[in-house]
């Protein structure tokens, strides 16, 4: 059966020292606890080694927030999937709407990033979701379908089994607006149906689909109680250990 997952996305926050402290605090809070979900934190590249080391002996796993769409070579400023893997990270967040919107990441670029992540044994946490105008026009299903078809549905069944999906409506990210539990359930079930049609119901049933967008200790329980919502990808609330722990405890 699929896993429940609570993953943090720190985005571009925290110096190395602050990040190390936050990781240590979380480790402490979770020590001895047996969370009813997998716990992942997605840090900036430069934190990966330090945070992975800090979290040794804890249940918390580490994700990068990106990897390059090229394997290696003359790509100044880029960080490859094999480099990410060598830090101890096990996951990588790909396709986040902020990267699509601000850094021009297209379906094609993301397709390459996913392939390279998988080739290097990283598990992608792949983000999809519509903007406000698309939701208002009732086009959210078409948008997530195109995102899946454009960057993931080229994968084999075996490859796709390593993907975690995150549905993140762009209008809910960092805005304090959250999808209602019903809106989340509806589109998560739709997404699972698309996976079933492409890869069969077993793969679909085993795929974790997380919700992201202003998820917090106050709304996590209700969101996670839906049958097709398998956890959350948490931005702002992952920057405070107590809030992140409270979201984990929603399971
Ligand atoms: P917020 O939880 O801050 O809305 O961010 C969600 C997000 O973008 C996680 O990737």
Image (cartoon, grey):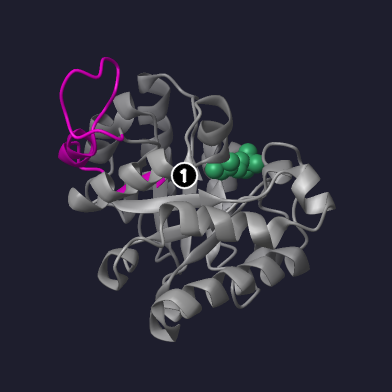
Answer yes or no: disc 1 within 8 Å of ligand 1.
no
Image quadrant assignment for residue 44: top left
Q: Position of residue 147 (x, y in %)?
A: 53, 53
Q: Nearer the viewer, residue 125 or 104?
A: 104
- Residue drawn 44% across and 75% down? 198
Q: Main secondary structure of the magenta part?
A: loop
Assess whether residue 128 is covered by the magenta stretch.
Answer: no
In the image, the segment drawn in magenta is 69-93
Residue 243 visible? The answer is yes
Q: Position of residue 197 (x, y in %)?
A: 49, 79
Residue named by callout 1: 107
Q: Nearer the viewer, residue 43 or 137?
A: 137
Assess whether residue 70 is covered by the magenta stretch.
Answer: yes
- Residue drawn 46% across and 80% down? 205
Q: Is residue 128 left or right of residue 71?
A: right
Asked if 30 appears above or below 193 in the picture, the reply is above
Q: Position of residue 78 (x, y in %)?
A: 29, 23
């Amino acid at each position: 059966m699929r896993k429940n997952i609570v993953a943090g996305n720190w985005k571009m926050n925290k110096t190395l020292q602050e990040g190390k402290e936050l990781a240590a605090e979380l480790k402490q809070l979770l020590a001895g606890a047996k969370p009813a979900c997998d716990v992942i934190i997605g840090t900036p590249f430069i934190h990966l080694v330090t945070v992975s080391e800090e979290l040794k002996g804890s249940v918390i796993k580490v994700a990068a927030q990106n990897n390059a769409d090229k394997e290696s070579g003359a790509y100044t400023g880029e960080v490859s999937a094999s480099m990410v893997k060598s830090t101890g990270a096990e996951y990588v967040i790909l396709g986040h709407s902020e990267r699509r919107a601000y850094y021009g990441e297209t379906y094609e670029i993301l397709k390459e990033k996913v392939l390279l992540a998988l080739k290097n044994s990283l598990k992608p946490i792949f983000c999809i979701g519509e903007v406000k105008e698309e939701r208002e026009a009732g086009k959210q299903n078409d948008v997530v379908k195109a995102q899946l078809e454009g960057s993931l549905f080229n994968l084999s069944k075996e490859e796709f089994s390593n993907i975690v999906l995150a549905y993140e409506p762009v209008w809910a990210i960092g805005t304090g607006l959250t999808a209602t539990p019903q809106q989340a359930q509806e589109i998560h079930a739709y997404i699972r149906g698309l996976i079933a049609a492409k890869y069969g119901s077993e793969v679909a049933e085993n795929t974790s689909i997380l919700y992201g967008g202003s998820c917090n200790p106050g709304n996590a329980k209700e969101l996670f109680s839906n049958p097709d919502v398998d956890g959350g990808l948490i931005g702002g609330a992952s920057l405070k250990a107590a809030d992140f722990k409270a979201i984990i405890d929603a399971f």
